[in-house]
Image: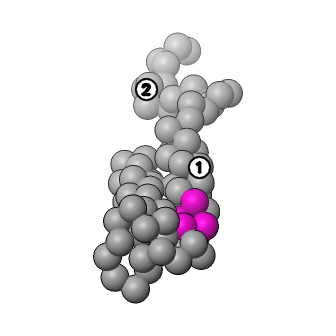
Amino acid sequence: MKWVLNILGVLLFLVGTLWILQGTGIYAVGMMANQMKYAYAGIVVDIIAIGLIVIANRRRKNLPPSSNTPPSSNP
């Protein structure tokens, strides 16, 4: 699940960055060129993508011990 969220986060980040570049006119291709509403939308998408990547990679504290150990055979 972690790798799926990481891939999704990176893809969202790339899309958001492309929208920022198109909206500001740096990468002026297509109908989105020089339209600031797309740059603002790209900023929002990038913030969401960064949050998704952070959530996917955060360390969890206070996890219960692993239950993979076999039960002890003490009488």
Image position of 27 (left or right of 43): left
Judge whether 45 appears above or below 64 on screen.
below
Residue sitting nearer the eye, 71 or 33: 33
Work out whether residue 4 can be spotted: no
32 relative to 36 in the view: left or right: left
Residue 64 relative to residue 31: left or right: right
What type is the residue that disc 2 sits on? Answer: Pro
Q: Secondary structure at mark 2?
A: loop
Could you classify mark 2 by the number of other residues whose Cα lies within 10 Å: few (under 14), some (14-19), or many (20 or more)? Answer: few
Residue at 42% across, 76% down: 33
Residue 43 picture location, percent across and down: 57, 60
Counting from the top left corner in percent of width and height, residue 36 is at 57, 72
Please determine whether, in this image, residue 59 is positioned above or below residue 47: above
Task: Say which residue label 1 marks.
Answer: 51
31 over 46 or under it: above or below: below
Q: Which secondary structure, mark 1?
A: helix
The residue that appears at 50% across and 46% down in the rendered structure is 53
The residue nearer to you, when weighing 75 against 64, is 64
Residue that mark 2 sits on: 70
Residue 1 painted magenta: no
The prevailing secondary structure element of the residues shown in magenta is: helix
Q: Tell me, for residue 17, which label it has, or none.
A: none
Q: Residue at x 54, y 48 (%)?
A: 50
Question: Where's the C terminus, which quadrant?
Answer: top right
Colour option used:
one colour
Res. 46 in view: yes
Q: Nearer the viewer, mark 1 or mark 2?
A: 1
In the rendered structure, which amino acid carries the disc numbered 1?
Gly
Q: Residue furthest top?
A: 74
State the image quarter where residue 29 is shown: bottom left
What's drawn in magenta, residue-wise? 39-43
Instruction: Note whether 60 is above or below 55 in the view shown.
Output: above
